Amino acid sequence: MESPDVVALFEACDANGDGKIDYTEFIAAAVEKTVLMSNENLRIAFNIIDTDGNGEISKEELKSVFGGGAVSSRPEEIWDQIMAEVDDNNDGVIAFEEFENAMRSIVKRRSSIYNEAMVTQAE
């Protein structure tokens, strides 16, 4: 039987609720959120994904950067879903502000889930 601490921690790290902790979720959980969420670090992460350096992240760039390894078998619908969730103005690309909002939302959601789990466990 799994410890409630382990279950709560896993659920807090699994930001998208798919039952797995992928690389992005692991990094988000492993790094102190204030350091991770600094504007400088968000810009660095954005620039890594924006491989052509045009100031926008396309679906093709997401697939290129994250398409290797465990996610390579993901269907096209997954990439479409990511774009739909992050591309707030529906222009087909992710601007830095949209990327920043999405990353902050993921960390905030992960933190609130973890905090709720810890409060529930303490009761």
Image: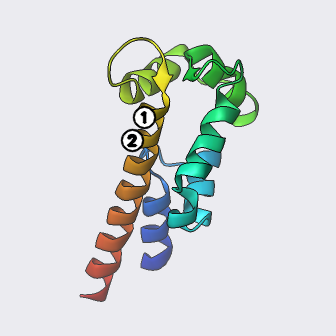
2 or 34: nearer the viewer = 34
111 or 12: nearer the viewer = 111
Amino acid type, mark 2: Asn
| Of marks 2 and 1, the one in the foreground | 1
8 or 53: nearer the viewer = 53
Name the residue at the left extreme: 123
Residue that appears at 46% across and 45% down: 103
On screen, residue 51 above or below 25: above
Where is residue 99 drawn, in percent x and y?
Answer: 47, 35
Give the structural element (helix, strand or loop) at label 1: helix
Where is residue 9 drawn, in percent x and y?
Answer: 48, 69
How many C-alpha atoms fall within 10 Å of the one at disc 1: few (<14), some, or many (≥20)?
some
Residue that appears at 43% across and 55% down: 107
**Drawn side of residue 22 relative to residue 116, left or right:** right
Which residue matches tag 2? 101
Q: Are marks 2 and 1 in contact (CB under 8 Å)?
A: yes
Amino acid type, mark 1: Glu
Where is residue 95 drawn, in percent x and y?
Answer: 47, 26
On screen, residue 76 above or below 70: above
Mark sitting on residue 97: 1
